[in-house]
C-alpha cells in the first residue's frame, strides 16, 4: 500500500520560497530536507552527517589536503546546489501537488526564486570548478600549486 499524504487530513503549507532559501544557504546540513520531509528523512541526516564526518576527518588527518578531508561536505554542498535548482525551478502547481496536497493554499512564487537561482548558479559553478581544478592539481602534481 502506497502512502498518500492526503490521508493524514489537513497539513501545514510548505512554502516554496522558504524551502529554496534553506536549500541555498543551509542545504549542506540538510535543513531544507527536514523542513520538507520532517526529521525522519534519511537524505537530510546524510547531509547533516557529512558536516560531522568532514570535521572528524579534518581533526584526525590535518596533514592531508583540505579537499580530501572535507570531501563529504563538498559532495553534500554540490548535491544541495542541485536540490536548490530542483526545488526552485519546480512549477508552483507541481509543488502544491507534491508538498501541499491538503493545505488548500496555492503557492505563488515570484522574483525571489529567480534571484536565488542566479546566486545558486554562481556559487554552484564556482564550487564545481574549484573542486575540479584542485582535484586535478592533487592527482596530477601532488598538490604542487597549493
Image: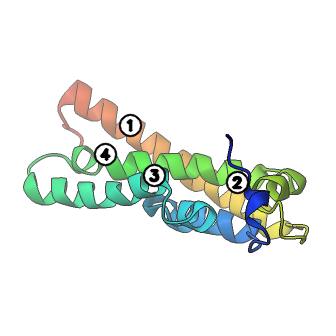
Element marked by disc 2: helix
Q: What residue does disc 3 label?
A: 42
- Quick one: label 1, few (<14), some, or many (20+) residues within 10 Å? few
Q: Quadrant of the N terminus?
A: top right
Q: Position of residue 145 (x, y in %)?
A: 24, 41
Residue 84: image quadrant is bottom right
Q: Position of residue 132 (x, y in %)?
A: 41, 35
86 above or below 16? above
Q: Residue at x 76, y 59 (%)?
A: 7
For marks 1 and 4 on the same chain, the one whose residue lies earlier in the sequence: 4
Residue 51: image quadrant is bottom left
Considering every residue shown, the one lying at the far front of the view is 1
Q: Nearer the viewer, mark 3 or mark 4?
A: 3
Tell how many labels. 4
Q: What residue does disc 2 label?
A: 87
Q: Nearer the viewer, mark 4 or mark 2?
A: 2
38 above or below 67? below
For marks 3 and 1 on the same chain, the one whose residue lies earlier in the sequence: 3
Q: How is the image coloured?
A: rainbow
Q: What residue does disc 1 label?
A: 133
Element marked by disc 3: helix
Residue 71: mark in rendering: 4
Element marked by disc 4: helix
Q: Nearer the viewer, mark 2 or mark 1?
A: 2
* Horizontal relation, residue 5 to residue 55: left or right: right
Q: Nearer the viewer, mark 3 or mark 1?
A: 3
Q: Are marks 1 and 4 in contact (CB under 8 Å)?
A: no
- Quick one: label 4, few (<14), some, or many (20+) residues within 10 Å? some
- Closer-to-camera residue (77/46): 46
For marks 3 and 4 on the same chain, the one whose residue lies earlier in the sequence: 3
How far apart are labels 3 and 1 at the CA level?
Answer: 31 Å
Amino acid at each position: 500500500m502506497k502512502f498518500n499524504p492526503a490521508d493524514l487530513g489537513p497539513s501545514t503549507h510548505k512554502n516554496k520560497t522558504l524551502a529554496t532559501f534553506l536549500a541555498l544557504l543551509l542545504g549542506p546540513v540538510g535543513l531544507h530536507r527536514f523542513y520538507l520531509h520532517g526529521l525522519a528523512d534519511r537524505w537530510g541526516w546524510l547531509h547533516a552527517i557529512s558536516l560531522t564526518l568532514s570535521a572528524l576527518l579534518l581533526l584526525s588527518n590535518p596533514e592531508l589536503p583540505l579537499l580530501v578531508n572535507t570531501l563529504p561536505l563538498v559532495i553534500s554542498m554540490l548535491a544541495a546546489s542541485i536540490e536548490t535548482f530542483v526545488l526552485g525551478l519546480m512549477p508552483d502547481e507541481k509543488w502544491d501537488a507534491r508538498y501541499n496536497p491538503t493545505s488548500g493554499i496555492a503557492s505563488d512564487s515570484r522574483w525571489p526564486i529567480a534571484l536565488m537561482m542566479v546566486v545558486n548558479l554562481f556559487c554552484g559553478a564556482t564550487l564545481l570548478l574549484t573542486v575540479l581544478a584542485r582535484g586535478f592539481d592533487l592527482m596530477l602534481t601532488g598538490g604542487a600549486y597549493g
